[in-house]
Image (cartoon, rainbow, N blue to C red):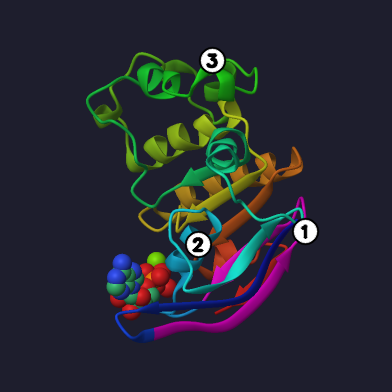
Amino acid sequence: MIEGIDIRKNFDGKELFNGLSFRIDDGEFVCFSGESGKGKTTLLNIIGMIEPLSSGEILFDGAKIRTNKDRLDFFRVKAGFVFQNFALVEGKTVEQNLAFVRKSSRSGVSIEDALASVGLAGKLKSKVYTLSGGEQQRVSLARLFIKKCDVILADEPTGSLDSRNAQAVIGILKTLNEQGKTIILVTHDESVKRVCGRIIEL
Ligand SMILES: Nc1ncnc2c1ncn2[C@@H]1O[C@H](COP(=O)(O)OP(=O)(O)O)[C@@H](O)[C@H]1O
Ligand SMILES: [Mg+2]
């Protein structure tokens, strides 16, 4: 369970959130929606511990992340990230990109099985720059089968894809959700919103 309690966030005197609270249960598939500039990315990054709060708190299973060890554990085994621009190393192969997941963070799923899960079984030795955008996003999703994570934070993961590739990406996120992972996704695509269990309007 993830709770946001009375969250406030200011940038340069501009107030983005003024006492926002929410609760996301384990296994939910939630979408943050709202106009550009509303703070969707900022909120996702606050939950993902890569953006500080001005005040308020984020609790994971009722507890705050306090120590460096809590933080390390959060990134190592709890959180998984997906970005609109994939965040892969383009000059390296698919296999090399997927091998970056640290041993201590691995779920036990092999690179080959993870690639099969995203429909890219033949692409192990391909350089990332030779793949289409849809394929690159599927490689970044393959990472989430290899890495341990309970919560997946996805910032407009279909934002740069055509509708067929967007559907493939959403299908894969659904599979990860069915495995028990909580999905928090930012989108303004109506067809993506329809598959979410709950929409939180910002
Ligand atoms: N690091 C930052 N410094 C100053 N302002 C920021 C920063 N990050 C975001 N903002 C501002 O906060 C607002 C919300 O940004 P963002 O979270 O990216 O919105 P969204 O993802 O909903 O489009 C915008 O007005 C943006 O300019
Ligand atoms: Mg954004």
Answer few, some or many: residues within 10 Å of disc 3's Cα (few below 14, many 20 plus, some between 14 and 19). some
Quadrant of the displayed image that contains ligand 2: bottom left
Q: Of callouts 3 and 1, which one flags the residue occurring earlier in the amino acid sequence?
A: 1
Q: CA distance from mark 2 to mark 1?
A: 17 Å
Q: Closer to the camera, 102 or 193?
A: 102
Q: Which label number is shown at residue 17?
A: none
Residue 165 coordinates in the image, percent (x, y): 46, 47
- Magenta part of the chain: 15-33
Task: From the image, state whether disc 3 or disc 1 is nearer to you.
Answer: 1
* Label 1 CB sits under 8 Å from any ligand 1 atom: no
Residue 1 coordinates in the image, percent (x, y): 75, 56
Q: Which label number is shown at residue 46?
A: 2
Answer few, some or many: residues within 10 Å of disc 2's Cα (few below 14, many 20 plus, some between 14 and 19). some
Q: Quick check: marks 2 and 1 in contact, CB under 8 Å?
A: no
Residue 31 painted magenta: yes
Residue occupied by mark 3: 112
Residue occupied by mark 1: 25
Residue 18 coordinates in the image, percent (x, y): 53, 85
Answer few, some or many: residues within 10 Å of disc 1's Cα (few below 14, many 20 plus, some between 14 and 19). few
Q: Secondary structure at mark 2?
A: helix
Which residue is depicted at the point 52% across and 23% down? 115
Q: Of callouts 2 and 1, which one flags the residue occurring earlier in the amino acid sequence?
A: 1
Q: Amino acid at mark 1?
A: Asp
Quarter of the figure with residue 80 = top right
199 to the left or right of 142: right
Q: Amino acid at mark 3?
A: Glu
